[in-house]
Each structure stands twice: as structure tokens, then as C-alpha cells.
Amino acid sequence: MADTGVAARIHGGLHLDEHKQESNATAIRTLGLPTRLVLPMHQHIGEPAEPLVRVGETVLKGQMIARASDYVSAPVHAPTSGRVTAIGEYPVPHPSGLHDLCIVLEPDGEDRWDTLPPGFPDWRSTDPAEMRERIRWAGIVGLGGAAFPTAVKVNTSGQRRIETLIINAAECEPYITCDDRLMREQAADIVDGIAILRHVLGAERCLIGIEDNKPEAAEALRAALGATVDAATDVVEVPTLYPSGGERQLIMLLTGREVPSHGLPAAVGVVCQNVATAAAVADAVLRGRPLIDRIVTVTGRGVVQPGNFRVRFGTPAPFVIDAAGGRSTDYHRLILGGPMMGFSLHDHQVPVTKASNCLLAPAADELPPSPTERPCIRCGECARVCPAQLLPQQLYWQARAQDFDKVQDYHLFDCIECGCCAYVCPAHIPLVHYYRFAKTAIWAHERDRDKSDLARRRHEARQARLERLEAERKARLRQKKEALEQQPSAAGKDPKRAAIEAAMQRVAAKKAAQLDAGQAPNDE
Amino acid sequence: MNALDVNSSSPHLSGPHSVTRVMGLVLVALLPGTLAMQWYFGWGVIINITLAVSSAVLAEAAVLALRGRPVSHTLIDLSAVVTGWLLALALPPLLPWWQTVLGSTFAIVVAKQLYGGIGFNPFNPAMAGYVLLLVSFPVTMTRWLPPDVISGAAPTLTESLHMIFSGMPPDGQTWDAISRATPLDLMRTELAQNRMISEIRASPLWGDYGGRGWEWVGNWFLLGGLFIIWRRVISWRIPVAMLGSLLLVAGLFWAIDPETHPFPAFHLFSGGAILGAFFIATDPVSAATTPRGQLVYGALVGVFVFVIRSWGGYPDAVAFSVLLMNMAAPTIDYYTQPRIFGQRGRDDA
Amino acid sequence: MITAIFTIAGLATLFGLLLGYSAIRFRVEGDPIADQIDALLPQTQCGQCGFAGCRPYAEAIAGGGAEINRCPPGGESTMIALAELLGRDPVPLEDEAAAEKPKSVAFIVEEECIGCTLCIQACPVDAIVGAAKQMHTVIADECTGCELCLPPCPVECIHMHPIEVTPQTWRWPHPPTPGREVVNG
């Protein structure tokens, strides 16, 4: 079956009920225009985008409405033509349920495209840097769910040479089928994107890792590859085992190489991209189209007709749910992402973003709340299933005790939060919750420390400046005094009068000095 | 939708495992060996289990209520039942009832709940209870029955009840007539009198490869042990390491002098080695948890069993060895942390 | 008797040598203690401890001249960290320090500001920009929330705004601890 065998196995993992057939049987449906689109500025990892438009401005489809504010950032484009009605804080899909900066766009219904940059029909002879710039312009981020800016990921200059591009088509999490449908329906785009990415990276070969529960998708990819006669790209079917789609896990499965604990895949000559990202790259490079929509799986017994939808970013979740036949009587809650790694939405109105791969509306008994937590009995089942080979129960003890140094000694930051440990825990301890608690607490401490270091530096600089000014003032005074002392002897005035004059001059000098000090910061 | 749903972290899916299921499987696995013991040693075994389990559960319920913890929610984890059961299997079949109750209550109250309850006890509660009884009541605790294949018939239910609750032998009989030392005890006392293994082997207590009766009890516990390994309740590491090291050390000394050291299989199939290896040393709370740590832990338990049996003051040694190694478990875990994913040679491409 | 004395003396000598050797061999070259204390302090430079900034307070603690419970912005966590560093017993925070305030930054109402520069002189970390007779602004990222700029302002146009939690700074809450809540099993 597989063109190339699996190179190695991964530690642990779980066989889960797949629940793929609910949503993968029907073709992708393209969603219409909602009455308004809410576009968060922070849909990716890194710095948020900076709005380029003002309230009231009219924008065209594909127009950049917010630009990347930093190297690790991504621009946002208008998903349709219309008018910007507000820029402000709106609920965003985030586990905190907090609000964040968004641009609100009211579609005019015309869906009129902006003038797009030309494609690169002869991309094979185009400079990779130029194509990276195009990928960056298009706002492409990892569409597997992590949303890391793709342009940054494919810029491997200064690192070791990339031999292998790995395309992550594993889609190992239950319920999610957006990549499956995309591969079946748009295999040609994916194959184009892969060829472009290989060119950009200078990678000799490409391995597409796909779980063996998606034979149709694998076949579609093979057919598309056959049409392009791409001999350096292979489809590798990996056994269905959650989380084989974890980046490091998939690299291990396909190449047998182990990405170092604190390193990037580039350290072993590999770059990994999601299939949907590859399709988006093809769109940007061949057709000059920015990333303005994505495939979203809508599933769970809480919706009437589960399926996959091409959804514009900013589309409110209820609009997508309605397209899937609306809420069923079982509708109970909404999860963004899959059952193992997704998070519950506080506000069901939040918009679809670049990171939204799945809207899961489980019935109450479909994903029942975990039974009450009991004390850990140290059975070690968590360690047995951990794909990162960590000791989850040790992490748990340290996180619970809020010993944030110890918890890092047990490699907290190598945890990929896949949820295997919590799934098997016989005591039903919310292990991943503890790890997230510890990680966010450590990040908060680091921010506090950085801030206090900055304050210390600035305070020391200020102290130094004040001392310098004081010294200068004293020096000036001394000079004046010396000048005065010399004057009377030269002019032969009587000493008493000279003393009064000196006092007056001192007062004047002091005033001047005070004024100097007061305006001092202006000199800086 | 309630607040719990939105504030809880992924995964939103939980597996079929539960503490109750783990403990339940252990109980199922104990059944064949328990029935074998009942077959060979009579009703005393069942009475002991009833006494020990009910006092363990009562003690647990009482302490939980005193500590203000949810009682029934905790009791259904079945851990108190397992503790009582394991303790009862280690006790002589005709032990006076109050000693059984005392041991079982001590195991739960002192060795388990005073440390914080399930998950927090550094020592195996059942073995702590056993050791308390052994050091406090050495006479009754070493008064074992011979298997009925030797005595002709094990005491009946009424006889057993009478002996256990009155603490007296039946009218017209003495304890000496009824009870017999365990094969391990026999081996130790006879060896101490400079008798040769070949002479000791002539004793009716000696079976095909272990103590008579005991060897079959061991086989049935082995079966239960394999069952829980198959059901992945325990890992194979501790039992294999413990029995392996016991065999190895015993084999070594036997090879040096077979007349003063019994055949290795004798060590495995007389006394509590099999029960201990699969059901006691593997208690996850008090044992080592890392894969390499479990091998070290099991192997050292095995060595201690041999050392204490051969040169110690007590006939059987599983309880002491397990408790000793319980103390070392955290240290073993610390020094045997597995290599995590991504720590292999930095550049192995 | 003689043997015992010799044995004990021999042992004492042996351990003495061992300790002496290890004291030299394993000596930890640490930062001066004041630096270590300073590193734990929040660096607000607010002076609420009664010293002219975090560094002087750190030196006072190191010199034994000050208690470790006088830093209100650091709160209990700083006090406990100091206690651990110095091997002292934790001391309850002083009254005013005990009520922990939410972390805040100063904000100047620009319409009301008369450009007097008094706040600029008061700011310990130069986080206020502006010139005489021109409106001033606080650089929020650099403000430590020390409140030292509040008293000098003649028109009271500086307000403290609590730092709002954003999705980027949000922390997962500690999971509910089992056993604490009563479960109706």
C-alpha cells in the first residue's frame, strides 16, 4: 500500500473512537455571506496585526486591512467587499473567553475583488525569497490549528539545510475531517503547494504523512501526484494512532528522526506543514490570492447536518452552525477544535479564524464531563501513553504544588497537551489543565521578571543621570565661585560688598541650576 | 451549559479507566488463589477475608467521616477491600479474630488514612498491618495449618469459627496437634539445627517443587497475576524483576551448596513470593513508577526476600522486603527518570 | 577506653577534613546577597518600604537593617521568596502592605494636564514623556505602577488604571483541588 514504510514508532498514544464518518461523507459546501464579519487581529502565533483601515472605510475583497506588526506576525485581508463599521474589542475564540481587538466588516453583498498581485506562473525559476514574501503578504499561517506564520517557518536561512518537507495530513484527532475532505476535493492544489514549498525550502524530497483511516484522501493525493510526475514526493500511510499528527511525532514516524527537545524540526533537516497550508500557498503563489477563508468541520450531535464548510474568516459561529442544519435538540455546548485538544467557547457568537479547524457541538452524553477527580494512585498509565515520554504524574504533583522550577525540571515545556494522560487517568485528574495552569503561570512570572528587569535598568539609568547632573551643577558652581573670588582681588572692592554680591550670584546660579534640573528630561 | 464546561480544559473525552475498575480487576485476579487457599487450608481463609475486609471498610468509612471527606464516593474505589483482602491472605487461617481486625484497622487508619488516604501512603498498608501483627503476636502469627492433603481434613466451618472467635483449640486437642509450621519456617528451623536439605525434603510438608499445597496456591496466584498483567492493571516489570532476582540469588547459593540452600523453585512456591510479586510489591502507590525504577525496585525486593529468609529472624520476608523498598521508591524514581522524547543525541540525522 | 577516645578523635578529624575539603571544593560563588534580594524585589521603585527604591531596601535587608515584609507591591509571594532566600521565618505583611492592590499603570488625562513637569521629576523610571508647558504621557509598558507621580500633580490629572488581562496575558486558573469540595457520592 504505502510507497514508503513507516520509519519508526512513537511512544504511547491512544486508539480512540474516530467519529470521522459523521462529517466526511459529504462534499465541502461554500458558505454565503453573513451580515457582518468580525476579524480578530490576533489569529496567529506572534504579535497581533495592526489595522490599516479606519471606521467607515470601504474595502474590497482580498484587500489587506491589517498588516503584520513584527517578523512573527501575519496580515489580515478583507474576506469580502464592504464597509468597516467598527474597530474595537469583541469576543474572540480563546479559552479565556476574553475580548480582543477586531475589525468589524459589513459586507456590501457584491463580493468584489481588489486588484490582486499577479501569480508566479514560472515559480520554479523565481527566487525563494520573493515567494516567501508572497506567502507572508498572503497572511498564511499553519492551518492545522497552531496558526504559526508560514513565512517564518519556511525561512530556514542560517539553519541547517532542509532535506525533507513533511506534509501533515494525519488529522489524528477524532471528529475533525476538514483536511480529509480538502485532500479528496483539492488534491491538485495541495500537490502544487507542496512543489512550491519544496522549491522555497530547497528540500529534496517530500513525505506526506496520512493516517491509514483516510484511504480515499491518500488515493486522491497519489492520483494528483501521478499527474505531475513528482517522483520526490511520497504518500506514507501511518497507522491510525492519536497523536500521530503531532509535529514531532509525525517526523519521528516518517523519518525516524527525533527533533531535539528544545529545538525546531529544522535541526534534523525537516520542515513540517499542514496540507491545507500547502493548498493556501498554491493559491497565493499561483493566483495571488491572500488567505481569506478555510475549511471548517462542523460536527457533533448538536448540529443537524454535520459536514465541512468553506468559511470566510470572521464569520460568526452561529452562521456556520445554521448552515449545518442548525442546532439539534441535543445542542448543549460548543468546542473549538477537537475533543482532545479543543477548548469550550464561553461565547457561542465568536468568529471563525485562521486557527479554527473544527466547531464541535457535542450532545450532553456525547462528551460527558469527566467523573469527579480522585487522588492519584501513581499507576503510571499516563507515562505509558505519553507521546513525549514525560512523567505526567510528576508534572502533576509539581504543578499542583506550584513548584514552577521543579515542574520545568520534569520538562513541562515538552508537553504537547495532547490529552492522552488525562484520557487514561483512572483517577480522572484534569492533568492537562494542571500543565496549562503551570505553563501560563510560568509565562506570567517571566513577563513580570522582564518588566522588573526593565524597571531596574531604567531606574539605575535615571539615578546615574541625576548624579551626573548633580556633579555638573556642582562643577559649575565651583567655577563661578572661583571666578568671583578672583574678581574682588582684581577690582579691589571692599570684602563686605563682595560677600553680598557673591551671595546674590549664588542665588542666581541656584535658580538656574533648578531650572536646568527641571528641564533635564527634555535634554535626553 | 454550566460554568464547569467552559472552564474545564481539554481533553473533553475520558477513557473507560477508573480506580474502581483497577481495584475490581485486582480482586477478580485474587479469586483463583484465594479459592485454592480455601481448598488447602479450610474456612479460616474465608473468615479472615470477611473479617479483614469488613473492618478495613468500616475503618476507612469512620476515618473519612472524621476527616470530613465524602465517604461513599471514596469507598467505591474498592481500595480498602483490596487492602483487607491482601492482609487476610497473609494471615494464618486460624488467627484469633481480634488480631485480624486489629491488623486490618491499623493498615487503614495508620498506614493509609493518617498519611492522607489513597494515593498518599508511602507504605503498603496491608504489609504494614501484617508486620504490626507479626511483631506483636509472633506465636499466633506463626501458627499455620498444614494443608489438608497432609492433615487429612481441614477444620470445618464450625470448628474454624469456634477456634477463631474463642482463640482456643477444639476440646481435647492442643494447638500443637492442629497447627504446623509453614514450609519456610520448617526450612529455617531445620537448617538452623544443621540438618541437610535432603533430610528436610523428607518432611511431608514438602511437595513437588515447593511447600505441599503452597505450590498450587502459588500457581493460582500466578494465574491471577498474569491476568492483571494482560489487563494492564500492573506492568510485568516488578513481578518479573522480583521473581527473577529471587531465582537468581537463590540459584547462585543453591549452586554453591545445595545441601544448605534449598532449590530456587522452593523460594518461589513456598510462602508469599508469588502473591507478593504480583499483588503486593506492585501496589502502585507505594512502589516505584518509572520503567527502569520498577526493575530496580522489583529486583531489590527479590534480593531482600532471599536475604531475610536465609539469614533473618522471620520465616517469610515479603512484607519486610516490600516495606523496606517502599522507603527507597521515591529515590529510585528520581534516579531512573526516563529519557524524554527529543533528548536523544542532538543530531542523529 | 583509650581505643574509644582514639576512635572518636580519629573520626572527628576525618569528618573535619572532609567538611573542610568539601567547603573549598564545592563552594558556590554566588551573587552578593543584596543583588539576590534586589532580583526578587518587584522594582517598582515606589519607596513604600521607607527606602528610596528597591536597591536601598535590598541593601538594608542584606545589612540586617530592615524586615522582609515591607514591600507592598511584591506582596506575600515576594515576602516568602525573601524568607526562603535568607532562611528567615516568614513575617506577616505590614498592615498597609497586606491589602494587595491590582497591578496598575498611571494614566494622564491629557486634556487636564497643564505641562508642569512635576510628575516627570517624580517618576523613578523615566516612564513619563513631555516637556514644560506641553502635555505629558505615560509609557504604559514602562510604568511600574509606583504611584509616586500622583502626589506632585497640581491638577490631579493622573489616575491609576488596573492592567487588564488580555488573551495573551491570561492565565489558566488552578484546577479545583479535589477533596476540598464536598462531593455527594
Image (spheres, coloured by chain):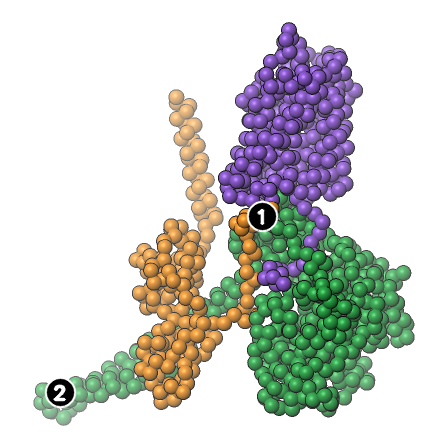
Circle 1 is placed at which residue position?
C184
Q: Residue furthest front?
A: A329
Q: Is residue A6 above or below residue B180?
A: below
Q: Is residue C86 above or below residue A165?
A: above
**Which residue is drawn at the image coordinates 57% and 71% (left, top)?**
A98
Label 1 SS: loop
Label 2 SS: helix
Q: Which chain is green?
A: A
Marks 1 and 2 belong to one chain: no
Q: Residue furthest bottom?
A: A491
**Which residue is drawn at the image coordinates 66% and 65% (left, top)?**
A333
Circle 2 is placed at which residue position?
A500
B156 or B300, which is in the foreground?
A: B156
**Which residue is drawn at the image coordinates 44% and 37% (left, top)?**
C15
Q: Which chain is orange?
A: C
Q: CA distance from mark 1 to mark 2?
A: 91 Å
Residue A283 falls in which quadrant of the image? bottom right
Q: Which chain is purple?
A: B
Q: Residues within 10 Å of mark 1 (few under 14, many from 20)?
A: few
Q: Amino acid at mark 2?
A: Ile
Q: Residues within 10 Å of mark 2 (few under 14, many from 20)?
A: few
Q: Position of residue B283 (x, y in %)?
A: 64, 38
Q: Position of residue B325 (x, y in %)?
A: 60, 35
Q: Is residue B113 above or below residue B274?
A: below
Residue B203 falls in which quadrant of the image? top right
Residue C162 appearing in the image: yes
